[in-house]
Image: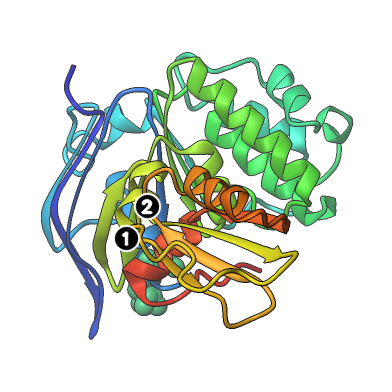
Amino acid sequence: MSSVIELRNLNKRYGDTVAVRDVSLTVEPGEIFGIIGPNGAGKTTTVEMAAGLRRPDAGTVRVLGLDPQRDGRDLRRQVGMQLQEAALPDKLRVGEAMRLYASFYPHPADWRELLDVLGLSAKRDTAFGKLSGGQKQRLSIALALIGNPKVAFLDELTTGLDPAARRETWDLIESVRNRGVTVVLVSHFMEEVDRLCDRIAVIEGGRVLAVDSPAGLIGAVSADQRIRFVPETPLPAGFLSGEPGVSVDASGRAVVVTGGGDLLFTVVSALAAAGIRPRELRMDQTTLDDAFLALTGRHLGND
Ligand code: ADP
């Protein structure tokens, strides 16, 4: 089956600002595809070009085989878009907004059920302007899914939600994907993309720095593991010095051993042979944030 989304050499500038430089990406059917990067990286511009909301200066976009510029009408029926700030008239009630949006699509979802899933049933008669930030966010997700889309673009899905609502939203996105929807998720939450995404594009300065699974991105940074422990008695001189690729830093209270292979077994065996009991033994895993740091030279500042 061919890709659901194909972006080829997309470029976009706003005046002197180059927002997107030569971005090429493909998203496969049924994937949850993440786009991460710092503010201003070009994530929203990329997604808006894919969804047909912005015209690229150069490059081609195909979504479900359609060209958003040429086949916009056809495409809009099959694509759901959650915008960063869902701007609805303040007086429009939640139920009215859902009915209105449902009327745009040939085969809409049951909007009452969608409100129920998103915990908004009790707000059905509440005006948009009276909703909290989190409720507006959930409504924007509901509106993105109302048309039973084949592809959903979700921009800053859980920004403004509390941790519990964020987790519930993740479950919802997984259930959406399990119904066969391809999901493109713009996020600056590492935990979110790590948990949800099959593949992630790391974008900075309008360029794609890497595309891989979370495990692939992490694996590319370092195959090394790090083990820390506090030895109950001092380590013998030359501890683990005979092990290739293993380095030991015993300068502090905690000893830090870095290396690849079956490092935990190597360390624990050597300690046992020396009759030393490790206290506070801990193994540090490389995280997606480490991978991001290695790619971009900075942490992704989460709020
Ligand atoms: P992100 O979604 O990663 O935060 P954006 O795609 O929103 O990045 O923005 C990329 C760059 O383009 C930024 O430098 C931003 O200031 C600029 N930009 C975005 N939209 C506009 C616009 N409508 N007019 C001028 N500059 C814009």
Q: Nearer the viewer, residue 281 or 53?
A: 281
The C terminus - image quarter: bottom right
Residue 153, percent from left and from top:
44, 41
Q: What residue is drawn where x is 75% and y is 37%?
A: 94
Q: Residue at x 44, y 25 (%)?
A: 149
- Residue 216 appears at what percent x and percent y? 33, 44
Dot 2 falls on a residue whose secondary structure is loop
Q: Is 263 drawn above or below residue 73 in the view shown?
A: below
Vertical relation: 264 (above or below) 299:
above
**Dot 1 or dot 2, earlier in sequence:** 1
Q: Residue at x 54, y 23 (%)?
A: 176
Q: Is residue 70 left or right of residue 269?
A: left
In the displayed structure image, the side of residue 150 where residue 299 appears, left or right: right
Could you tell me residue 18's position as x and y percent? 23, 76
For disc 2, the marked residue is 260
The answer to whether 193 appears left or right of 198 in the picture is: right
- Residue 17 visible in rendering: yes
| Relative depth, front residue between 283 and 5 | 283
Dots 1 and 2: beta carbons under 8 Å?
A: yes
User: Which of the 4 image quarters holds residue 69?
Assistant: top left
Name the residue rendered at 35%, 49% in the picture: 219
Measure the C-alpha gap from mark 1 to mark 2: 7 Å
Where residue 245 is drawn, which disc sits there?
A: 1
Mark 2 crowdedness (10 Å alpha carbons): few <14, some 14-19, many ≥20: some
Question: Foreground mark, 1 or 2?
Answer: 1
Residue type at numbered disc 1: Gly
* Residue 195 locus on image (x, y percent): 55, 40
Quarter for ligand 1?
bottom left
